[in-house]
Amino acid sequence: MNNLKLKKFSAVNLADEFFESLRDDYKGFDKWFSDKAKADAEAYVFYNYKNKIDGFLYLKDEIGEVNDVNPPLPDRRHLKVGTLKINAHGTKLGERFVKKIFDRALGSNADDIYVTVFEKHDGLLALLKRYGFRQHGVKKSNGGEEFVLVRNLKEITGDTLHDFPYIGLADKKYYLLAIYPQYHSEFLPDSILKNESHDIVQDVSHTNSIHKVYISGISATARLKRGDVLLIYRTNDGKGKAHYRSVATSIGVVEETRRISSFASESAFLEYAKPYSIFSRKTLKEYFATKQRSYIIRFTYNAALARRITRGRMIEEVGLGTVRRWDFMALTEKQLRHIADIGEIHESLIVD
């Protein structure tokens, strides 16, 4: 169920109890909301299974110097996170909203993203800082003093998380990693194929999250290192020839790899893997007990290809070989760049 919707302010129920804490934080919130509705403004709204609001995100493009924060932000193109609130309920919904913020920033070619947050919202502050937001200064309003956090989108630090969603290719290694179709689209919802139903995308941790945990039985995956780049390849769905039905869909960056035997207990393994893996608790327990799939890859889900690339095109245009099975194999930087290019990934996402 596609619960995250872009809605007109005028179509959102301001009486929903979700907005009570925003009224407490910001005097005049109802008037601000009404003004936005009159201006035909839109926001991203997340609805739970009871059709109640669990998340709200309002974004605004700004150009020029921002003078209502101290110190001011320079004259450039900004994306302002005007309102961001999430009811945390253990499904990594915050990560889904952060990814939406970055998606919008890329679409508007923003130089930076900024957001104001009260100090008491420590969970939100921690979430934003995890993805490279830094405290810039403060803003004073009728609700009190807020921290101003900024993510500079023109600065690459070399840190996998602080640079997300940007993909650095210099001095990295590149690999194709295959995922079976029965797991692919629920695991990587932004990479859903045009002929697949959005009903398979649920409000659960592994669909919302920026981070993914892939559990493999392929020993060669143990060579992966932090910062290595993964091309995700959805294998044939059995409805035709792999030449046309198997496709490259997305690109991620490795955070770490582990052996399943490195976990001291089953509970430690489940705590690590369950929020970010497609597999059920029962299946994960079986993997831990049997060590049938020994290799664990945690990676960030950086970008879906706007145009999926078939196996046939990767053979004929990119130069991938057919001698060995396409489950896990090395790529060259030239091949990865070619796939990103014909896959129409946003040009700013790939950095040297």
Image: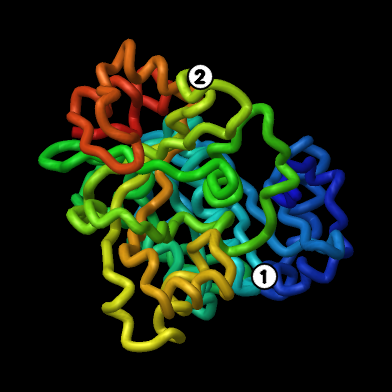
Q: Is residue 278 above or below residue 178?
A: below
Whether residue 225 sits left or right of residue 68 in the image: it is left
* Residue that badge 2 annotates: 244
Can residue 64 be seen here? no
| Amino acid, disc 1 | Asn
Taking the spot 62% from the left edge, 68% from the top edge, the residue there is 142
Q: Position of residue 330 (x, y in %)?
A: 21, 37
Q: Residue at x 32, y 35 (%)?
A: 325
Q: Position of residue 211 (x, y in %)?
A: 43, 58
Tag 1, which secondary structure? loop
Q: Residue at x 52, y 80 (%)?
A: 120
Count of numbered tags: 2
Toward which corner of the image does residue 177 lie, by quadrant? top left
| Residue 248 position by quadrant | top left
- Kindly report the distance in space between the C-alpha atoms of the residues bearing marks 2 and 1: 42 Å
Q: Residues within 10 Å of mark 2 (few under 14, many from 20)?
A: some
Residue corresponding to mark 1: 87
- Do labels 2 and 1 touch, CB within 8 Å? no
Q: Residue furthest top?
A: 316
Q: Amino acid at mark 2?
A: Tyr
